[in-house]
Amino acid sequence: MMKTNQNAGNSFTGITEKDWQLEAEKALKTKPFDSLFTESIEKIILKPLYSEGDSEHQALPGEFPYVRGTKKSAGWRISQCVDGGESPHALKRKLDEAFKRGQNSLLLKEFSSLESVEDWKEAFNASLCSESFHAVFDFSSDPAKSAVFAAFLDVLKEAETVSLEGIAGFDPFEGVLYGEQTLSGAEEEIEWLLDYTDWSAGKAPFVKTAYFKGEHFHEAGANAVQELAYTFSKSIEWLNTVQEKGYAANQYMKKMAFSFNTDAQFFTEIAKLRAARRLWSTIASAFGGDREAQKITLHSETSRLNKSKLDFHVNLLRSTTEAFSAIAGGTDSLHISPFNEIDGTYDPLSDRIARNTHYLLSDESLLSKVTDPAGGSWYIEALTEELAQKAWKEIQKLEELGGFKEAMLSGYIQDDISAVLEKRVEDFHTRKTEMIGTNVYANKEDRLLQADSTFSRSRLHPSSPFHEQLTLHKKGETALIEKRENIQSGIKPLKPVRLSETFEGLRLNALAFKERTGSFPKVALVTFGLLKEYKARQDYVTGILSSGGLDWTAFSSENLDGIGEFSQIILCGTNDAYLKLDDQLFHAIGKSGSIWIAGRQNSEFLEQYPVAGTLYNGMNIYEFLLELHNRLGVTE
C-alpha cells in the first residue's frame, strides 16, 4: 500500500480576504485593486470576491419568506407559446402536437379565434377534461375574452369534471402603459378584473386571474430594480382598490400572479426572481395576507431586448442562458423564445428547438433534479438582498409620489426607464455591451430576418361589465367589445425596443446599396509596417466595418495605386509607424477623400495631420458607421 505523510484530519491554513487581495494586487501589477470592482446597470457595485459575511442565511425552499422558492420540489412548467389566431380547430391541432412532444403547459396570448363558448369547446374540451391541465392565458390585449373563458368553464363544469390550474388573467395597466388606453379605461378594467377574480374564487380556485407583468418595463429598457419596483407597485395599486371597496385582500392576493422576463445578465436575473419572492412576501404580509397568500406565482419569458435579426441563430444561445437564469431563479412556468420569434412568425423548426431546450436543461443539465441550485452562492444571496432593498426603496418613493398611477401620469416612471435605456444604448454603441454577430464578429454577407413583429395593435376593450358579458356568452350570444385606436391617453407610453435595431438599420441600408450598385459600400484601408505590427488594429477596424455592412480594400503605404477611387480612407498601423508620415505621403493618400486613423493620437499629431476622426477602443462605433454611410451615399 502506498504510504502518505498527509493527515486528512489537519485543517487547511486559514486564508483571509486580505490575503487574497494582496495576491490579486500582485497579479494586477500596475492596475489598482479597485479596477476589479464593476458597476451594474442597476448601479450596484459588484465585488471581485464574495464571502460568507456578504450574505445572510436563508430559510429552506418552501419556507417563509420563500426567497429560495415557494415549494420544496424542483421543476417548472414547459409553457411554450402557441399561436391561436387561425381557428379553433387549428389551435386544437397545435395543442395536440405540443402536448404530444412533451409540453406540460400552454402559453396563449392571442384569442381572435376564440370568440364564443363553442370555439373554446372545440379547441380545449378534451384537454381541460384530462387529469390535469396547466395553462397561462394572457388576456391583457383583450380582457373581454376572460368572460368567454369564464362562460366556457361554467358550461363545461355542468357536464364534466374540470381540472385547470395556472394563470388565466390580465394586467389592467397594460393598455394605459402602452398608450392604448385612457386612465378611465384602465379603471374600468380594474373593476372588470375585480368581478372576474371574485367569480373565479369559486369556479376556478387554482387559476390566478390578476396577472401583473414586468415585461412592459423590461422590454422598454428598464433595469432589474425598476422592473421589480414598478411591477409590484402596480399590484399595490390594485390591492389598495380591493381594500377601498371593503374586500378581504387576503383572498384576492391568492388569485394574483406575476411575470418577469429574463435577459443576458445571468446572475442578476437569478437574483431578480429570488428578490421578487422576498418582496411579494413582504407586500402580502403588509396587506394582512396569510402564509399561502405570501407565496408568489411566477411566470417567466426570455427577453426580446437583446434579440437580433442579425446572425439570428445566436439567439438560440442567448435564450438558453436566459432560460437557465429563470429556472435557477425558481420560476414556476417558462416560455423560451424561438430564435426567429422577432420576425413575427413561429416555424416548426425554431419552435421545436425552443421546446427541446427545456428538456436539455431538465434532463441533461439536471436542473429539474435540484431545488434552488443557486442557493448558498454568497454572490447571488448578496445580490438578491441588494436588489430587494433597492426595489423596496423605489416602491416607497412611488408611494410618496402618490402611488403607481400618479407616478405614471407624471411621467416619472417613463423618464426613469428612458434614462436607463439611454445608458444601455450608449454601452451597446460603444461595445461595452457586446452582441455577437451584431456589433462584434459581424458577417456583412449574413442573411437578415426579413420581417419584424412591429409593436402596433388595436386595444380591445370590454363594452359592458363582466357579469353581463358572462351571461350573454353562456346563452350563446355575442357580447360587444370596443376596438380602440389612436387613443389620446395623455400619458407618455412605453415602447418595447431591441438594442440591435440601430445596427440592423445600417446593415439593411448596406444591403440595399449592394442591390442598387452591385457591391457593398467600400472604404480604403492603408497599412503601415509589418503585418504583426498592424494586425491588431486592422482586425479592430475591419470588425467595426463589418458591423456596418461595409467592405474594404487594403493598400500598403508603399503602394497606393488605385487609392484615388476611394473617398474614405483609414490609416492602420502603430503610432510609431505614423511618425514616419510626411506631408507628401499624407496628402497623396488623402487627395481624393477623407482620412481616418486607427488609434488615439495626441493633439500635436492631429494639428499636423488633420483627419476626419480617430478609431479607438471605447469609441461610439455606431456614430462612426453612420457618418461613413452618409459620406458614402449609402442612405438614399
Image (spheres, helix red, strand yellow):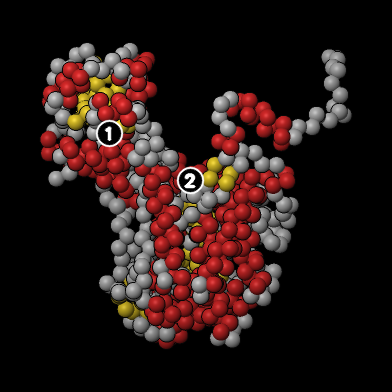
Q: Is mark 1 on a helix, strand or loop?
A: strand
Please report the residue visible at 20 percent of the width from the left and 19 percent of the height from the top: 583
Q: Where is residue 617 in the image (x, y as percent from the top left)?
A: 39, 33
Q: In terms of depth relative to the viewer, which is nearer, 114 or 258?
A: 258
Please report the residue visible at 33 percent of the width from the left and 81 percent of the height from the top: 480
Q: Position of residue 332 (x, y in %)?
A: 57, 58
Q: Position of residue 6 (x, y in %)?
A: 84, 21
Q: Which of marks 1 and 2 is in front?
A: 1
Which quadrant holds the N terminus? top right
Q: Which numbered marker is on residue 613? A: 1
Which residue type carries mark 1? Gly
Please report the residue visible at 44 percent of the width from the left and 80 percent of the height from the top: 187
Q: Mark 2 packing: few (<14 Cα in 10 Å), some, or many (20+)?
A: some
Q: Earlier in the sequence, mark 1 or mark 2?
A: 2
Q: In terms of depth relative to the viewer, which is nearer, 612 or 305?
A: 612
Q: In terms of depth relative to the viewer, which is nearer, 374 or 477?
A: 374
Horizontal relation, residue 51 to residue 481: left or right: right
Q: In terms of depth relative to the viewer, which is nearer, 253 or 178?
A: 178
Q: Which numbered marker is on residue 264? A: 2
Please indicate, yes or no, whether residue 534 appears anywhere in the rendered image.
Answer: no
Horizontal relation, residue 307 to residue 134: left or right: left
Q: Mark 1 packing: few (<14 Cα in 10 Å), some, or many (20+)?
A: some
Q: In which quarter of the image is residue 539?
A: top left
* Residue 86, placed above or below residue 467: above
Q: Which numbered marker is on residue 8? A: none
Q: Where is residue 283 in the image (x, y as percent from the top left)?
A: 62, 69
Q: Is mark 2 on a helix, strand or loop?
A: loop
Please report the residue visible at 46 percent of the width from the left and 46 percent of the height from the top: 319
Please indicate, yes or no, whether residue 453 appears anywhere in the rendered image.
Answer: yes
